[in-house]
Amino acid sequence: AQKITQTQPGMFVQEKEAVTLDCTYDTSDPSYGLFWYKQPSSGEMIFLIYQGSYDQQNATEGRYSLNFQKARKSANLVISASQLGDSAMYFCAMREDLMDSSYKLIFGSGTRLLVRP
Amino acid sequence: DGGITQSPKYLFRKEGQNVTLSCEQNLNHDAMYWYRQDPGQGLRLIYYSQIVNDFQKGDIAEGYSVSREKKESFPLTVTSAQKNPTAFYLCASGPTGKETQYFGPGTRLLVL
């Protein structure tokens, strides 16, 4: 079965510094996708970044980058130049394909990030 | 503006009562999903639908029911058979294929 593991329940980072949130995954499928979502206190899940298993380069979206190490089955999120508004829960998720060509997301337990001024 | 709306924001259920959570999207997405989130945990899939008038059970469908009569709408009913319904419920939609899912603002369900 596919599984996502986030081993950091909570993280602190100083404003303007970079921070790495860890994510490891387990799957036997050669084709998969990895996602990161941000969940602020309001509860909405905000899509941040996506990495496909066959993508040659690490994904980047503004201040977010994904450190994809396929052999180690890790997909860590790097946030550069942290801002106070980055304080939130962060979830790593993996796409699991379903029988009818649809897919579902498998989520990790999340990491709570607090940015200190 | 395009997006996903969920209502109500908060919902209270009495014992033995069925309640329905609304989810509407105007993104023209084919696929819609319902997830449940318990405190300190990630999301788990309840039901999903790829097309109108068709839907499939997810990992934790027991005690829930859905309908998909319109492309834009995917309401979730929490029935009295769901013995532990207190949770945060998130609706998502996405284009058919391998792209990401986009989430609504969620509904918090509490049992009185």
Image (cartoon, coloured by chain):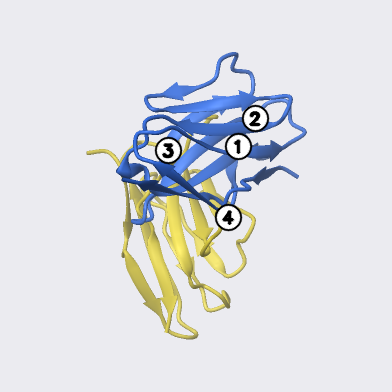
Q: Colour of chain B?
A: yellow
Find disc 4 in the rendering and name its residue.
B44
Asked whether disc 1 touches disc 2, contact meaning CB atoms under 8 Å apart, the reply is: yes
| N-terminal-most mark, 3 or 2 | 2
B56 w.r.t. B51: above or below: below
In the drawing, does residue B81 fall left or right of residue A80? right
Residue B39 rendering spot, x and y as whole percentages: 51, 64
B85 w.r.t. B102: above or below: below
Q: Nearer the viewer, mark 1 or mark 3?
A: 3
Camera-nearest residue between A12 and B54: A12
For the residue labelled by badge 4, is the local secondary structure a helix, a strand or a loop? strand
Q: Colour of chain A?
A: blue
Residue B19 rendering spot, x and y as whole percentages: 42, 73
Q: Amino acid at mark 2?
A: Tyr
For the residue labelled by badge 1, is the local secondary structure a helix, a strand or a loop? strand
Q: Which mark is residue A95?
A: 1
**Both on one chain, marks 1 and 3?**
yes
Find disc 2 in the rendering and name its residue.
A32
Name the residue furthest left: B1
Chain label for disc 2: A
Chain label for disc 3: A
Asked whether disc 3 touches disc 4, contact meaning CB atoms under 8 Å apart, the reply is: no
Q: Which mark is residue B62?
A: none
Distance between the Cα atoms at labels 3 and 2? 17 Å
Camera-nearest residue between A102 and A47: A47
Q: Amino acid at mark 3?
A: Phe
Distance between the Cα atoms at labels 1 and 3? 13 Å
Q: Residues within 10 Å of mark 4 (few under 14, many from 20)?
A: many
Find disc 3 in the rendering and name its residue.
A47
